[in-house]
Amino acid sequence: MKILTYIYTLLFSSFLIGQNLTGAWSSSTDQIQSVWIMTANHFSITKYETDPAVFISTAGGSWATADNHVVLSWEFDTSSPEKVGTQTNVNFLQSDDNIQWENTLWRRIDKGQPGALQGAWLITGREREGVISERVPGVRRTMKILSGTQFQWIAYNIETKEFFGTGGGSYQTVNGQYTEKIEYFSRDNSRVGARLQFDFELQQGKWHHSGKSSKGKPIYEVWSKRADLGI
């Protein structure tokens, strides 16, 4: 027993402020996959079946550390909408590549690299008839949260606690091309497995995103980092 305790202590250290949570983490049981994306200040946790592809749930918001624990502030939660606007204090055990949270073991996918778009973004502009109109989001938001290899978009309302849709999976950024592989999609499970390619460019800190949507319609979007918006 003492040997097992010693090994466990070596593998996991109690959470300390300053340990690096940024990146993506995964947990799986049978055909159910969970992905947890953490940026500097925001997070999302999504659960879905892989075979057949079925979206199950997603939740997330912002996070911070306090007194050697993590405080999760919920902005959306499809399973428990009543949690929106509340906070949860979380204690867990962490090594560099694993997190033990309650009865779930999360394994690190990446540390926020190599993708060029790591962070939490809100859509702030769209092009219509050749003109880009921009605005600061209010209570209804569409967020895109990315680690170094994983992405997710979520549309929700922090005031009414409504959820409008989400999709996500893996992505790459190579030579100005942003390519997504869809691994879950709340609106249409049949889209899982599709690959979408877009042009991307960072202009004055904003992500200019153009190409065709999952429905084949041309799009031109502008995304701003939440840290720059102060939201």
Image: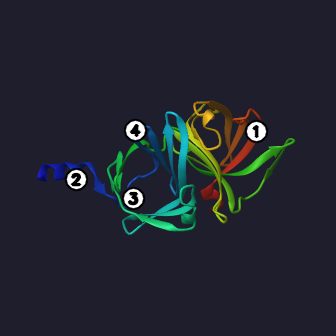
Element assignment for label 3:
loop
x and y, in percent, of residue 12 in the image: 28, 52
* Label located before the other in sequence (2 or 3): 2
Q: CA distance from mark 4 to mark 1?
A: 37 Å
Instruction: Provide the residue designation for mark 4.
Output: 30
x and y, in percent, of residue 184 in the image: 56, 39
On residue 11, the disc is none
Question: Image point 35% across, 58% down: which residue?
Answer: 92
Outermost residue, right side: 129
User: Of residues 125 and 106, which is closer to you in this image?
Assistant: 106
Residue type, mark 3 in image: Gly
User: Of residues 177 and 180, which is closer to you in this image?
Assistant: 180
Instruction: Provide the residue designation for mark 3.
Output: 18
On residue 9, the disc is 2
Instruction: Provide the residue designation for mark 1.
Output: 219
Task: Determine crowd level at label 4: few under 14, some 14-19, many 20+ residues with C-alpha closer than 10 A.
Answer: few
Q: CA distance from mark 1 to mark 2?
A: 51 Å
